[in-house]
């Protein structure tokens, strides 16, 4: 069945030859690309790719990008400390028990507790993915060693369980799934474990990761093969995560067609058909069950060229982003889409916008951006990153949020380090480990600067390094400095965000006469020399984000940032352990009086503190700061506006 077998050793040799430039540091030489989407493998000196549709622009391997100081690095380091704090023996406990291997370890709690039906999703899944991604982003060898150790022990559990099955719960859960008896989400958990093992192969070069993932795929194939189409469709009524995606990725790295065939057994007809026909029938659906299915559709499009799958992904993205997302770019309320398109004003609660949904929408967005290089996708990505992802990890202990409440007057709640381990702990652990994956993209002749984040890029094929220095978003400028051994002709594409109010760009101190329009890329084509400097200025201004179905419900933004009214701090015990704020009423958030002709005039910048604003002409003093900066205080994102009388 295999198109071509290859050994990883062949590939590494090929990559090293291709990248043999003097500027290439050693740590770049021995690793495959991080992203299965851009996987190309070398066989007998030839490049093999299974992608039928190549991305117009591609990411750089994460190991070529390093974060500098700033809010993204603070989030990444908090995540890294959290991953270091997790003891491998505790992670392995329920896997060992399930495989009949003695384990004296103290069990983890929350969704990893020995009686939780989702156990294993984090411990043997997200944990491995997060460590693999963190290793790619930082070069952290200790985390890689810990994850290698956990993976090796999971391999022993898999051998003991026989038949390729690997889980922390008994295979009997799958009998219940087959019989349509009550069970939480067995395939969801299997997806996380398969993805974790595969990420260890792709990002850390651990061959056993591929072996474990392939054995699991063999088990999945055997389970699904005897089922009729209709029976399988009924099984797809139970949440199954990204089974289609991980099986597609397994096909991409092995070339074994069979995995793609098994992947497509996870196509849910009831969900895909209306999307392909451009009908929004999302009302009533559980959100985070469905976004990963569209990521799988994106992979099917890339691997088969079937346009129907692209239609599904494009239409879905447009509907979710334009009709079903709040100002933060988050989506869902109580984990579902409860309304018709564009009806959000009555959908503000303490359990709006599950964090996993933002993670998965951003992941989907990278595919759509890769196909099109359209700046509007990165506008969305930036909005989600700075408003939903930053600020939902605790900067000190690395615990994560589940929901980001958007009802006024509540506060943020975080998991407990060893006793929550929710789905959102898992996707969060991965998110903050891969903040390096989207800042820069490229094609053969162009470098895309998508995000303004303090960072360094190595591009050995072009013999250049790029240093981006910025305190963005506290600073409304960024400086890019090029190091090149020899002059290099290159188009540098700078994203001009949707919110930019004018702006300018200087090259080596000289202001260019032209600038780009909002939501586009400004192209700088020239032969770049060592030390060339690009200075980009992107002035931010206040603007309003109104509810689509009630203009009197408004949020205030400053450039890319959602501003939140900051109220009193809550006690620490109220912040930990719950999915959402509980047992206390919201603080009283006043209505705002504003002039419809000047809707932002009630907010004025504080001259002394960056990114701090004061309300003027209101019933009480109010301070507004970016939502991501609020950790312990109650807050309000949406305000009820009444018209100022003349
Ligand atoms: Zn979640």
Image: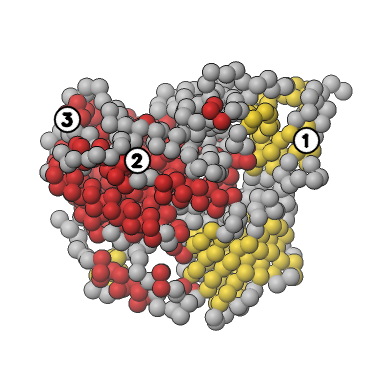
* Extreme-front residue of the structure: 104
Percent position of residue 572, x then y:
56, 30
Label 1 – label 2 distance at C-alpha = 42 Å
- Along the horizontal axis of the image, is 261 left or right of 59? left
Of the numbered discs 2 and 3, the one sitting upstream in the chain is: 2
Residue occupying the point 65% across, 58% down: 470
Q: Nearer the viewer, residue 363 or 567?
A: 567
Residue 163 figure quarter: top left
Percent position of residue 278, x then y:
43, 34
Q: Give the SS element for disc 2.
A: helix
- Label number found at residue 122: 2
Color theme of the render: secondary structure
Residue picked out by circle 1: 614
Cβ atoms under marks 1 and 2 closer than 8 Å: no
Q: Give the SS element for disc 3.
A: helix
- Label number found at residue 172: 3
Residue occupying the point 52% across, 35% down: 330
Residue 45 figure quarter: bottom left
Residue occupying the point 55% across, 53% down: 73
């Amino acid at each position: 069945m295999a198109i071509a077998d290859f050994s990883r050793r062949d590939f590494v040799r090929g990559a090293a030859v291709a990248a043999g430039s003097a500027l290439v540091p050693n740590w770049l030489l021995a690793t495959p690309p991080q992203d299965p989407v851009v996987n190309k493998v070398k066989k007998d000196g030839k490049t093999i790719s299974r992608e039928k549709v190549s991305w117009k622009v591609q990411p750089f391997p994460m190991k070529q990008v390093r974060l500098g100081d700033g809010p993204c690095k603070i989030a990444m380091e908090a995540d890294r400390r959290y991953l270091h704090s997790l003891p491998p023996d505790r992670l392995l406990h329920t896997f060992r028990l399930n495989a009949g291997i003695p384990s004296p370890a103290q069990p983890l709690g929350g969704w990893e507790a020995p009686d939780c039906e989702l156990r294993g999703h984090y411990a043997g899944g997200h944990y491995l993915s997060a460590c693999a991604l963190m290793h790619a982003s930082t070069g952290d060898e200790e985390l890689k060693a810990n994850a290698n150790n956990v993976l090796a022990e999971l391999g022993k559990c898999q051998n003991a369980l026989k038949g390729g099955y690997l889980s922390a719960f008994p295979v009997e859960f799958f009998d219940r799934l087959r019989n349509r008896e009550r069970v939480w989400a067995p395939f969801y958990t299997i997806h996380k474990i398969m993805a974790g093992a595969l990420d260890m192969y792709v990002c850390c070069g651990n061959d056993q990761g591929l072996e474990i993932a392939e054995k699991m795929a063999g088990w999945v194939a055997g389970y699904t093969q005897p089922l009729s189409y209709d029976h399988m469709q009924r099984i797809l009524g139970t949440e199954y995560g990204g089974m289609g995606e991980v099986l597609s990725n397994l096909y991409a790295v092995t070339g074994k067609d069979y995995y793609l065939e098994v992947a497509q057994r996870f196509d849910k007809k009831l969900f895909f058909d209306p999307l392909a026909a451009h009908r929004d029938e999302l009302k009533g659906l559980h959100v985070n069950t469905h976004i990963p299915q569209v990521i799988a559709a994106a992979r099917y499009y890339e691997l088969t060229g079937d346009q129907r799958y692209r239609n599904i992904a494009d239409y879905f993205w447009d509907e979710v982003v334009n009709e079903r997302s709040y100002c933060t770019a988050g989506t869902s309320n109580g984990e579902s889409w409860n309304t018709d398109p564009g009806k959000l004003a009555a959908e503000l609660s303490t359990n709006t916008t599950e964090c996993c949904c933002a993670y998965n929408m951003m992941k989907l967005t990278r595919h759509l951006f890769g196909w099109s290089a359209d700046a509007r996708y990165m506008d969305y990505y930036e909005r989600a990153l700075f408003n939903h992802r930053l600020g939902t990890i605790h900067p000190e202990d690395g615990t994560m949020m589940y929901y980001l409440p958007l009802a006024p007057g509540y506060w943020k709640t975080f998991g407990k380090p060893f006793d929550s381990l929710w789905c959102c702990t898992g996707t969060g652990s991965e998110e903050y480990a891969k903040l390096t994956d989207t800042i820069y993209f490229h094609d053969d002749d162009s470098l895309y600067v998508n995000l303004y984040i303090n960072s360094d890029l190595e591009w050995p094929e072009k013999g250049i390094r790029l240093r981006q220095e910025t305190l963005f978003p506290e600073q409304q400028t960024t400086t890019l400095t090029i190091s090149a051994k020899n002059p290099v002709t290159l188009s540098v594409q700078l994203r001009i965000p949707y919110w930019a109010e004018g702006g300018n760009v200087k090259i080596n101190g000289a202001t260019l006469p032209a600038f780009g329009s909002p939501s586009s890329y400004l192209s700088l084509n020239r032969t770049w020399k060592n030390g060339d400097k690009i200075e980009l200025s992107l002035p931010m201004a206040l603007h309003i984000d109104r509810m689509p179905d009630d203009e009197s419900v408004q949020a205030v933004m400053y450039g890319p940032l959602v501003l939140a009214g900051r109220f009193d701090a809550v006690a620490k015990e109220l912040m930990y352990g719950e999915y959402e704020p509980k047992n206390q009423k919201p603080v009283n958030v006043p209505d705002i009086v504003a002039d419809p002709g000047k809707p932002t005039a009630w907010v004025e910048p504080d001259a002394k503190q960056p990114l701090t604003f004061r309300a003027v002409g209101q019933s009480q003093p109010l301070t507004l700061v970016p939502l991501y900066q609020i950790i312990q205080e109650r807050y309000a994102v949406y305000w009820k506006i009444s018209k100022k009388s003349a």
